[in-house]
Image: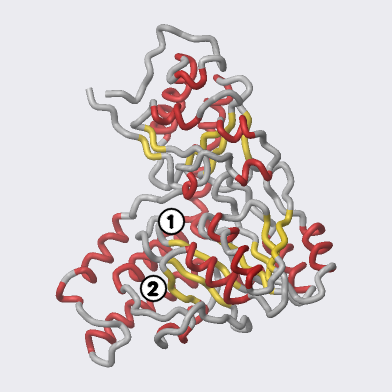
Amino acid sequence: MTTTPIYLDHLASAPLAPAVLDAMLPWLSAAAVGNPHAAHRPGWRAAEAIDAARAEVAALVGAPPGAVLFTSGATEANTLALLGAAAPGGACVLSAVEHASALGCAPELRRRGHPVILLAVDGDGRVDPDRLADTLARQPAPALVSIMAANNEVGTRQPLAELAAVTRARGGRFHSDAAQAAGWGMVEATAMGLDLVSLSGHKLGGPMGIGALVVGEAVPLRPPSPGGGQQRGLRPGTLPTALCVGFGVACRLARAHAAADARRVAALRDRLWARLSAALPGLRRNGAPDGLPGCLSVALPGLDAADLLLGLPDLAAATGSACHSDAAEPSHVLRALGRSAEEAHGTLRFGLGRTTTAEEVERAAAWVIAAIHAGSPDGFRDIMPARASSPTPGKG
């Protein structure tokens, strides 16, 4: 009997929405040839489609269309923001729980003469605006602050408007990686006072390989390298029409259904937590409970989360950050929250999304609980009393 797989890794990549694929397909055919930067009818047609997509991306985060620079994804957008917007001699302030693509810019920032300061977070992963204010008050020059809208590992949301206001009061610029939060209607760039916002297509049902950096009108941005004049010379290169179109449709769908989808998915997340916590004494939730609707990060000391998932091949989930799922070291996010190395290695991250069903949640909970109770694989025999009659699910 074949087991139907369950996909609970939407935080790493959401399934491509059918309407997105339908919109992209015409632009992948030979009949749609045309460089969007060329001065002829096929090029103009492609450019119009990209302009329409740009408007949809901008609308998702409450920004003007001209503020949107298309990139290959949020990683490139983070790099472009941090290396391109840091003021000469100014510090770059990041939270300790930022995505690896942001933290990975630290060596280059230091090489260019920018002090890099990591802000500590509380036990849920939240940045205290007062701590940021104290940090900025000690800087001799305006700083670039980069704090993600919602964490990709534990789901905690940040008080963006407060943090941005603190930054602006000190003459600095504020950047936020909103790859996870934007699709749930949680980001309003202009209203919140955000100077730069990073976005990703495949986190909200769009295609991989496309994202955006939203750049405020008054933000001076230096391109990372010389190139062509596309996108005001800030991110040169020929734009991929099909990917831009797909990204735009995904943004339009997310904006149209954000509130209802967020309520439904949050209820499923809470249902999964209720099932797991009731059956597994000692299970601990990572992150704030009012975070991303689809994020549930749980830790059970003594559990080898990687071995557990290897024993459940029909369940797609994660043991930490999607970008570090193959790394042996404990998650830097969980360590910043004060979790022990044992708790970090015993953490499972479930990413629910718009296509997740109640039946999948119930089945996933049953699989995980049964696997732990059965004591298989060997990495977590001491957590719960073994139940010889409980089969290990997910095989078949």
Comparing 234 with 194, the one in front is: 234
Visual colour scheme: secondary structure
Neighbour tally class for label 1: few under 14, some 14-19, many 20 plus, Cα within 10 Å: many
Q: Is residue 313 above or below residue 49?
A: above
Q: Is residue 84 above or below residue 135?
A: below
Element class at badge 2:
helix
Which residue reaches farthest bottom? 39
Name the quadrant of the C terminus: top left
Earlier-in-chain disc, 1 versus 2: 2
Provide residue 12's location: percent of width, then percent of height: 44, 49
Residue at horizontal 28 percent and vertical 80 percent from the top: 46
Q: Amino acid at mark 1?
A: Leu
Residue at horizontal 77 percent and vertical 59 percent from the top: 129
Per the image, the residue denoted by label 1 is: 204
Provide residue 42's location: percent of width, then percent of height: 22, 85
Provide residue 307's location: percent of width, then percent of height: 45, 28
Residue at horizontal 74 percent and vertical 63 percent from the top: 162
Query: Left or right of 324: which side holds 27?
Result: left
Residue 347: name its quadrant: top right
Per the image, the residue denoted by label 2 is: 53
